[in-house]
Image: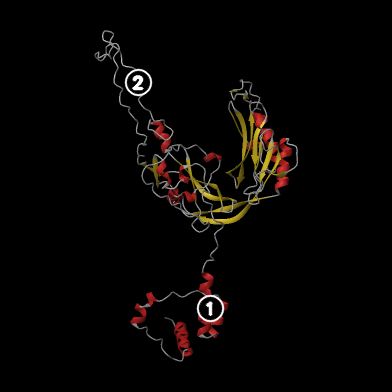
Amino acid sequence: MNANNDDISNRLRASLGGTEAPLLGTDIVTGAAERPAPRLVHPARRAAIAGGSTLAVAAIAVSALVIAQPLQQAPLFTAAAGSGSGGQESALSADSRLMMWTNYEYVPGDGLSTSPGEGHVYQLQRVGDAETVLQNAADALGVAGEPAKSAYFDEAYPTYVIGAEDGTAPSVVVSWTGTGDWWYNDPAAYPQYTCSSDGVCEEPAATENLAPGEDEARSIAHEIFTATGFEVDAADIRVTADEWQTVASASLVVDGTQTALDWSVGWGTTGLISFAYGHSVDVVDKGSYSTVSAHDAVDRLDDWRWFGSAGPEFQTGVNLLAASDLARSEGAPTADTPVEETPTAEPSEAPVDPSTGEPGTSEPGDPGTVEPAPEPTLVDPTPEPVPTPETVVVTVEDATATLLLVWDADGNAWLVPGFAMPHPDGWFNSVISLIEGVITLPEPLAIEPLDGEIAY
């Protein structure tokens, strides 16, 4: 150490009163690991603490702890029971799958991401008023009249109509709940059956299909959608056609994702619009929320409460075979299967022996012999026991992040983040990916086991 350093050391010792630094006891050193680590404090607070009492220090420490705790937000909404009803297998609880002939158990594949994420939640809020929405739809579809309360109007389910409600003429109806949906119907758009006074109806003769072609259908649908408040590019309208009808549809797109909420127009072979429907909503962003990983979301496929409806690219059919359907396919008797009996022989008079005039006693098989009536054979009407569903383990190898349509307990519609997961049998399971607590789930369904025979 040079002279300058020695001088600085001496001056420091002098400022401390000439005392040597105290030696640390071994108990202090060994117990250091059990003591809390010091916290960094803002310089302004450090000055206040230095000049304050021990009580003030404690108060600041408690305040810091309170601030550090995350704010607990109330759930956004309570999901409706059956919120994700869409006919997909994932929407069914494990108990209700007793009526299915395959019980799927899902396990995550190695390729699924284990990283959590986040996604936005949107509420679909009704916009406008019922009468205006109804009038716009009626004008777009050529239905004359003024809005009026429908025959089944209820304050809890307010519905209004323009046109005939008895099915004799076109009509437009709006329901001012949920997404403010409206729908149009024209019963004359399809070839009509002709029925005589005795109730015999004849199928209409085949005629040329006068429904518009793809481009024309897309153009007409675009005009109707725009007139009813749904802004969509004509190129985004899907057109499908078969020998019975032509349909043009478009989905609500949010954040670049096609959702399960759609608008549609259909034509019958007469060339008339047979049906149309749509909604009146604004999309309100409720913020971003944490989500579970695709790997962890697989565990939710067995709980119908996490189900939501995905957009059109993930909407495919699924074969759910009820027990009664399988019984019929295998020939087992059901409630509507007639009980067959072996017909019994009609009683007849005993043959007479022409030589004696007495009843004959010829051998069986001879002319005039009365065969004994066979005992009737009854088919047991009791159905065969329902077999135990086969359990199939499905490894989920892929998951696509998307938005799912769900409904809350008050009848409002929401779009929430989720995953669409392909099933090897040809459909998609869709499951909500929000972490627990963001929405309140309905109570699980309790299905009691059936006692005795199963009724069909």
Task: Determine which of the numbered discs, if any, sits on residue 347 in the image.
Answer: 2
Give above or below for 14 relative to 91.
below
Q: Residue furthest front?
A: 357
Nearer mark to the viewer, of 2 and 1: 2
* Residue beneath disc 1: 60
Which residue is painted at 42% across and 90% down in the image? Answer: 19
Is any atom of residue 180 visible in this view? yes
Q: Quadrant of residue 372?
A: top left
**Residue 421: horizontal and vertical position, in percent?**
47, 44
Q: Quadrant of residue 209?
A: top right
Q: Nearer the viewer, residue 245 or 393?
A: 245
Q: Quadrant of residue 249?
A: top right
Amino acid type, residue under disc 1 in the picture: Ile
Which residue is painted at 38% across and 28% down in the image? Answer: 340
Crowding at mark 1 (Cα within 10 Å: few <14, some 14-19, many 20+): few
**Considering the numbered disc 2 on the image, is that residue within a helix, a strand or a loop?**
loop
Amino acid type, residue under disc 2 in the picture: Pro
Which residue is painted at 28% across and 8% down in the image? Answer: 354
Q: Is residue 116 left or right of residue 234?
A: left
**Residue 63: horizontal and vertical position, in percent?**
53, 75
Q: Is residue 241 left or right of residue 401?
A: right
Task: Determine which of the numbered discs, if any, sits on residue 71 in the image.
Answer: none
Give above or below for 97 relative to 377.
below
**Residue 64: horizontal and vertical position, in percent?**
52, 74
Which residue is painted at 36% across and 79% down in the image? Answer: 29
Label 2 to label 1: alpha-carbon separation: 108 Å
Give above or below for 28 relative to 194.
below
